[in-house]
Every structure is written in structure tokens, then in C-alpha cells.
Amino acid sequence: MKTKAFYMFGRYAVDPEAKIVLEEGQPLRLTRKVVETLLVLAENSGRVVPKEELMSSIWPDRMVDEANLKQNIAVIRRALPIAPGCPGHIETYPGRGYRM
């Protein structure tokens, strides 16, 4: 039997295969691109991920404005209100990128 891998922090879990976010086992209603943004940050936890790297990972076949990335981060922060210093909190590094 195959074991499923999840990224877990606090009461949240991200299923990278199904591309869903769970809060205490219940799925949250988030768009695919928002979940992909969260996945890139979770996969690179502890490292500042440059904005350009995030954007090319989330939108590999398109040119998008940085506002799209900022919007995704804002949606994540509203959906997963995690306090600074707690696992899963997303920090902004102005002019550079984001770190979970």
C-alpha cells in the first residue's frame, strides 16, 4: 500500500498530489494556483523563495504580473491565519520574495 505525503503545519495539511488544503481534515475552498503557491513555499520551507522563482513555478507557461503572486499570498494569509513565529506563517521579504 502506498503512503501519502502531506505538508503539515498546525491544524493545516497540504496534499501535493490532490492539490488541496485541509483544515482539521476538512478541505478549504482555494483555487488551484493559490494551492500551488502554498505548495512551492511548503516545499522550500525555511528558505526565502525569490518572487521570480515562485512565479515561474506557478505560471511556467505564461508571463503574469507580480500582482497575481501578491494576491495569492493575500488569499493564503486570509484562509490560513497563522501567527508570526508559528509553523506555516509566510514572511514577506520586500523586493526579494517570501518564506514559510
Image (tube, rainbow, N blue to C red):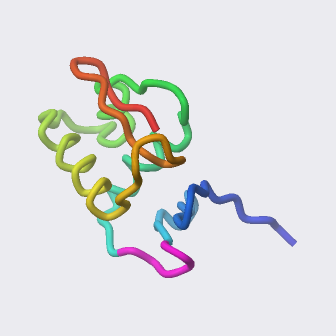
Q: What is the x, y in percent for residue 51?
A: 29, 27
- Magenta range: 23-28
With 10 as the anchor, is 94 left or right in this view? left
Residue at 30% from the left image edge and 54% from the top image edge? 77
Tell me if residue 50 comes above or below residue 14 in the rendering: above
Q: Residue furthest bottom?
A: 26
Residue at 16% from the left image edge and 33% from the top image edge? 66
Question: Which one is nearer the viewer's eye here, 36 or 89?
Answer: 89
Can you tell which quarter of the image residue 55 is in? top left
* The stretch drawn in magenta includes residue 24: yes
Tell me if residue 4 comes above or below residue 76 in the rendering: below
Residue at 70% from the left image edge and 58% from the top image edge? 5
Question: Which one is nearer the viewer's eye here, 24 or 20?
Answer: 24
Question: Which one is nearer the viewer's eye here, 81 or 22?
Answer: 81
Q: What is the x, y in percent for residue 80?
A: 37, 61
Q: What is the x, y in percent for residue 18?
A: 53, 67
Q: Residue furthest top?
A: 95
Q: What is the x, y in percent for residue 47?
A: 51, 26
Residue at 25% from the left image edge and 50% from the top image edge? 72
